[in-house]
Image: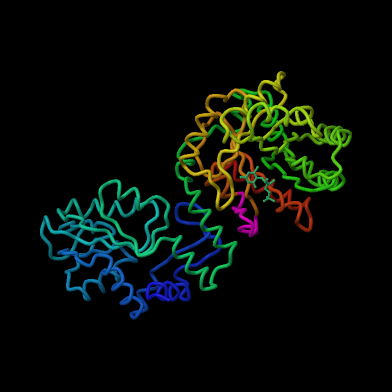
């Protein structure tokens, strides 16, 4: 075990890094929480940390050192004592009287400074401190951060020209905790997924139309029907009925049908699938008012995708109002559906960004996939995505929602419905095992319905 790893494990034991479900100052729900303020009361650990941070810049010749208040203040103080570099203190707020100086201590304009911070997230609060120091004539020589939450802040500051270093990235920390048995696989996956999908801010930044507005602006009859259904039943819940017998699907619909706006099916996992059964299900859907959604994830060349959509055992085109498709092969699947859904009875739901922890749908893929989606927007009503920003004309469907679990141990990652809606910008949530595996699927569906609808009203 390296000294750095031992230090990390000590921080874990002291609850300085915690895992679970936490709501951050920004309102974002995070699967981990870091609070280094407790370190101030642990002189030994503080000394070790200061040494590690100073080692990040072995040949630094800084003339000043400054900690972002408050958590990094004691860290910077110990670094100053250890290294002999004089400390300056940045005020959190202006005194409102006297010199109104924001930086206290003895310094001269033009001097180089090491800026110390405990955690970097977006980088915005660090930039505030940088601004104050620069206004006082101090030159930021390097920024030393204990932990990078890997949510873009470090990259952003580096792009602005700052020389920023982190002692640990959260990915590295998770790997260490996992290696030493402190974190189980599901919790580790949840953190990694959170990090990967932290496009949340950009998704939030774009104001999306509310459902009521969409009844007027809907560009596809299926979108209009879905939105009207959701508004009438007051639910943005899509239930993923991943059950393997026709009877089991029926039984589930009996319990949850009144609380959902769509039922998502993998028809190919239903052992006794038949078109007669599907007719009965369609009748039930009409009676209970929900849409039928085939999660076929077409991904082949257009010709094959067309056959998979209209033919074979499942004849999806005869019953599905919504169907998922990947755009990995280009626009083929979308075009195939479009050309066969001549009455616009079936709308396409492309998969943009998957909920799995090791998904390949990275930012590069997102850009290219969105290009394809843009070109065929008239047949698309919704996009399956996590935090990625999507064009406002489409609805966002977000799977990977569970009120209790963080992951399923097989790659699926979960968030709460609130997080999916408020942080990822979901219009509709897709819930499978959170409902059908619960002791009482009906009350679980009611709970997801209520929470989802309430969160949507807060957007
Ligand atoms: O990225 C995705 C896309 C989809 S459509 N992640 C997903 O989990 N899904 C589907 O949503 C998946 O095929 C399953 O039917 C459902 C999630 O089920 P749960 O049991 O994990 O809630």
Corner quadrant of residue 454: top right
Residue 49 place in picture, x, y as percent: 33, 73
Is 256 included in the stretch rendered in magenta? no
Residue at (69, 40) in percent of width and height: 235
Residue at (61, 52) in percent of width and height: 416
Quarter of the picture holding the N terminus = bottom left
Is 415 included in the stretch rendered in magenta? yes
Q: In this rendered view, identify the residue nearer to me: 211 or 308.
A: 308
In the rendered view, tell whether residue 133 sits above or below residue 70: above
Residue 201 place in picture, x, y as percent: 45, 45
The part of the chain drawn in magenta is 403-417
Tell me: 459 left or right of 297.
left
Q: In this rendered view, identify the residue nearer to me: 305 or 363.
A: 305
Corner quadrant of residue 108: bottom left
Residue 3 place in picture, x, y as percent: 37, 76
Give the dominant element type of the magenta stretch: helix, strand or loop.
loop
């Amino acid at each position: 075990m390296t000294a750095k790893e031992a230090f990390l494990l000590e921080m874990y034991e002291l609850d300085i890094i915690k895992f679970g479900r936490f709501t951050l100052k920004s309102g974002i729900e995070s699967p981990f929480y870091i609070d280094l303020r407790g370190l101030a009361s642990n002189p030994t650990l503080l000394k070790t940390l200061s040494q590690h941070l100073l080692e990040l810049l072995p040949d630094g010749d800084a003339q000043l050192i400054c900690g972002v208040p408050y958590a990094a203040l004691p860290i910077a103080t110990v670094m100053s004592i250890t290294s002999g570099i004089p400390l300056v203190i940045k005020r959190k707020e202006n005194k409102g009287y006297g010199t109104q100086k924001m930086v206290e201590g003895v310094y001269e304009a033009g001097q180089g400074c090491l800026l110390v911070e405990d955690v970097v997230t977006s980088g915005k609060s660090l930039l505030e401190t940088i601004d104050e120091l620069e206004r006082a004539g101090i030159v930021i020589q390097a920024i030393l951060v204990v932990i990078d939450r890997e949510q873009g802040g470090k990259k952003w500051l580096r792009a602005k020209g700052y020389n920023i270093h982190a002692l640990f990235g959260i990915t590295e920390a998770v790997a260490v905790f996992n290696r030493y048995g402190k974190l189980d696989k599901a919790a580790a996956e949840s953190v990694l997924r959170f990090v990967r999908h932290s496009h949340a801010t950009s998704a939030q930044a774009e104001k999306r139309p509310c459902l009521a507005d969409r009844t007027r602006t809907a560009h596809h009859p299926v979108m209009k029907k879905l939105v009207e259904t959701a508004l009438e039943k007051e639910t943005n819940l899509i239930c993923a009925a991943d059950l393997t017998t026709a009877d089991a699907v029926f039984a589930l619909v009996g319990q949850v049908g009144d609380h959902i706006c769509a039922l998502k099916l993998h028809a190919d996992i239903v052992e006794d699938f038949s078109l007669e059964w599907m007719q009965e299900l369609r009748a039930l859907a009409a009676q209970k008012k929900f849409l039928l959604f085939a999660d076929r994830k077409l991904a082949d060349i257009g010709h094959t995708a067309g056959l998979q959509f209209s033919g074979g055992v499942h004849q999806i085109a005869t019953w599905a109002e919504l169907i998922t498709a990947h755009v990995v092969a280009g626009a083929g699947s979308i075009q195939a559906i479009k050309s066969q859904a001549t009455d616009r009875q079936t709308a396409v739901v492309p998969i943009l960004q998957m909920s799995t922890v090791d998904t390949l749908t990275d930012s590069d893929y997102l850009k290219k996939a969105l290009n394809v989606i843009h070109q065929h927007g008239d047949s698309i009503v919704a996009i399956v995505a996590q935090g990625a920003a999507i064009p406002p004309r489409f609805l966002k469907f977000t799977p990977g929602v569970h009120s209790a679990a963080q992951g399923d141990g097989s790659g699926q990652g979960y968030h709460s419905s609130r997080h999916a809606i408020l942080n990822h910008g979901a219009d509709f949530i897709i819930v499978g095992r959170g409902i059908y595996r619960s002791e009482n699927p009906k009350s679980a569906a009611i709970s997801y319905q209520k929470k989802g609808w309430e969160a949507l009203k807060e957007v």
